[in-house]
Amino acid sequence: MLYIRYVNKTLAVIVGRPFTHKINRQMITIQELLFNRGLDKNSKTKLVRHKDNRRDLYNLYRTDRAEFLAYQNSQSKDVFKGVDYIVSFIGEEGLLSRFIGVYKLTDRKQLAEDSFEYQMEEVKGNFDDLKERVIIRWENAISWHQWVKNEMEVIEIHPGLHYKQFTDYSDFILNFDELKEIVTKQYSDWKKMLSATKGVYLISDTKTGKLYVGSAYGEDGIWGRWTKYVSTNGHGDNKTLKELVAADPTHGNNFQFSILMLLPRTITPDEAIKKERLFKNKLGTNSFGLNNN
């Protein structure tokens, strides 16, 4: 069961256990959240803040988790010697830092005088609903790794790096990276709503300015059709899009996805294709866009 503890008039945080002691201060720390979720208070634990002006760590974390973990595991100094766990954050503006997980150290190797390699495994379960959501204020900006005894204040809890929550069918445009994350991570709000309806959709190629109109009339609705685009690197088995992706495997990153019209789940494929054809004619996508039928 989750419990809500109010930090101030505008901020509430969720913790894993009820609080039985008297609250005598107007803040909650990341340590309280972690210890209430089962992190061993007696373990040797470090808080680690990743921020690198040479690399887009947000994008690396979202799109290539293995590469991000390799970045975390390789250090030029033996900063994790004797450490049992690290609590990992990505640095944001100023001293703000976003929690991305707890990792247990399982091995350590010194490869050279200035090269250390650590093996880590993520601690699953207790901290999952805090990942990518909890924002803290980092203390002592000079030190990017600190022992857990150094208390740091929780500023707020965000929806997470799942930056676009589903609100309405008509008020979103998803770029391909966003669509890949939503499909790969199976975000429940998007999956539920996009699976619930069939429809006519639009793909915009931001590199060429050309448009593609398609329709989704399968059992899994728009979700099922758009999942196909993710699994095929952007082309969805459409002839013209396949040619673009074959010429440049990264071309799908230029695509944006939106919905033109919702269709009832009872609609037949022929009726759906008729609606699709109507939008092709309205937008001229057969003559000037990416459709060819």
Image (cartoon, rainbow, N blue to C red):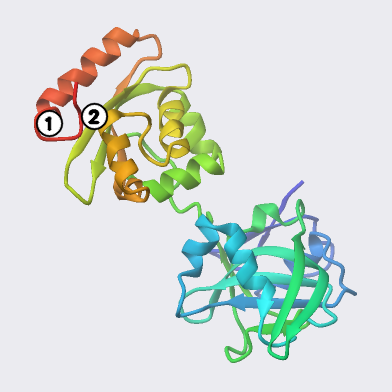
Q: Amino acid at mark 1?
A: Leu
Closest to the observer: 236 or 143?
236
User: Residue at the location (90% across, 75% down)?
Assistant: 42
- Label 1 packing within 10 angstroms: few (<14), some (14-19), many (20+): some
- Label 2 packing within 10 angstroms: few (<14), some (14-19), many (20+): many
- The tag earlier along the polypeptide, 1 or 2, is 2
> Can residue 79 be seen at all in this image of the molecule?
no
Per the image, label 2 sits on a secondary structure element best described as strand
- Name the residue that disc number 1 marks: 283
Image position of 46 (left or right of 240):
right
Q: Which quadrant of the structure image shows residue 6?
A: bottom right
Could you tell me how far apart the alpha carbons at marks 1 and 2 are, in whole angstroms?
9 Å
Give the answer, above or below, for where 198 lies relative to 167: above
Give the answer, above or below, for where 160 lies relative to 116: above
Pinpoint residue 150: horizontal percent, then vertical percent.
73, 84
Image position of 218 (left or right of 207):
right
User: Residue at the location (75% across, 86% down)?
Assistant: 78
> Can residue 292 be seen at all in this image of the molecule?
yes
Pinpoint residue 132: horizontal percent, then vertical percent.
58, 59
Pinpoint residue 47: horizontal percent, then vertical percent.
70, 77
User: Residue at the location (76% across, 79% down)?
Assistant: 148
Pinpoint residue 273: horizontal percent, then vertical percent.
26, 15
Image position of 281 (left or right of 48):
left
Q: Are marks 1 and 2 in contact (CB under 8 Å)?
A: yes
Considering every residue shown, the one lying at the far front of the view is 247
Quarter of the figure with the C terminus:
top left
User: Residue at the location (45% across, 54% down)?
Assistant: 163
Q: Which mark is residue 42?
A: none
Q: Which quadrant of the structure image shows residue 107?
A: bottom right
Q: Amino acid at mark 2?
A: Val
Per the image, label 1 sits on a secondary structure element best described as helix
Q: Which mark is residue 213?
A: 2
